[in-house]
Amino acid sequence: MTQISGSIVLITGGASGIGNIIGRKCLQRGASHLVIWDVNTELLNRVVTDLQAEGFSASGYIVDVANAQNVQQAAEQVIQEVGLPTIVINNAGIVVGNLFQEHSYRDIDRTLGINAAGPMYVALAFLDGFITRGSGHIVNIASAAGLTPNPRMSVYAASKWAVLGWSESLRLELEKQSKDLHVTTVTPSYINTGMFAGARGPLLTPILDPDVISEAIVQAIADNRIIVRKPAIVHLLPLFRGLLPTRLFDVIVGRIFNVYTSMDNFTGRTASPSPTDDINSKR
């Protein structure tokens, strides 16, 4: 069991979406301090102020997780000012819901930088401290998109496939070093936060309620769960991919479950949540 009560929790992309909800839930479960990393100064200041007004201990840092130097400097600052976190939650993410040929080079760089390299940078910045202490919990919010191909999500899916492979490999490495070093990987389908506005939930795959999935993630941290797949139908994706010929998989997942058309009417947020990002971000 990972003790959330009394823990220092750090979450990236924590000023909005499920990041905001997860952080609040950790505080409500007794976390001693919440560190929020985000790129939206206005939202970040507002969330931290609100939490402090409610009697919680929280602090915010402007951090671009795609910038390795920025991550390293912010991590050092957090350790000096707050202490070494107990739980690090890699939540920040962006999506470009276009055909691949419609992506710009910047779209590709930012998506892979934030979604794939970002969690690695953040984990690496705190990992030596975790190993020296002999305990710590890293939570990586991946996606069901990391388990199946999907048109209009090619670069996003690539970034999440990368996170899945890295996250599980990191878990195996850390488990050999200490029984109190944990990694939890989360693979949710579409979440109703605005990030995937216009996307249609595939057959038997409801759009997830932000509060419900956030509670499931927090409980998974407490229970040291290795993998969290939501909704339940997501558990079938690895089985289908492993057993079915590719063309049959395409028929079942694409035509019957309608996964391959789920992004056809994608619009994303009508306005960018951050002055520094012009594509949809923050779960």
Image: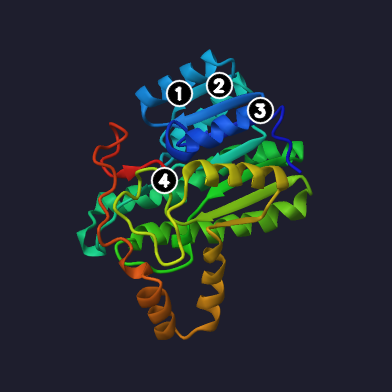
User: Quick check: 167 left or right of 47?
Assistant: right
Tell me if label 2 and label 1 are in contact, CB under 8 Å.
yes
Tell me the distance, in whole angstroms, between the alpha carbons under discs 3 and 1.
16 Å
- Which mark is first along the chain, 2 or 4? 2
Q: Amino acid at mark 3?
A: Ala
SS at circle 3: loop
SS at circle 4: loop
Residue bearing the label numbered 3:
31
Residue 102 occupies quadrant: bottom left
Q: Amino acid at mark 1?
A: Val
Tell me the distance, in whole angstroms, between the alpha carbons under discs 4 and 3.
24 Å
SS at circle 1: helix
Tell me the distance, in whole angstroms, between the alpha carbons under discs 3 and 2.
10 Å
- Which mark is first along the chain, 2 or 3? 3
- Which mark is first along the chain, 1 or 3? 3
Residue bearing the label numbered 4:
93
Residue bearing the label numbered 1:
47
> What is the residue that sits farthest to the left in this orientation?
102
> What is the residue that sits farthest to the right in this orientation?
179
Mark 3 is surrounded, within 10 Å at the Cα level, by few (under 14), some (14 to 19) or many (20 or more) other residues, namely many
Q: Amino acid at mark 4?
A: Gly
Tell me if label 3 and label 1 are in contact, CB under 8 Å.
no
Of 7 and 262, which appears nearest the observer?
Answer: 262
- Mark 4 or 3: in front is 3
User: Quick check: 260 left or right of 248?
Assistant: left
Residue bearing the label numbered 2:
58
Residue 167, position in %: x, y?
58, 55
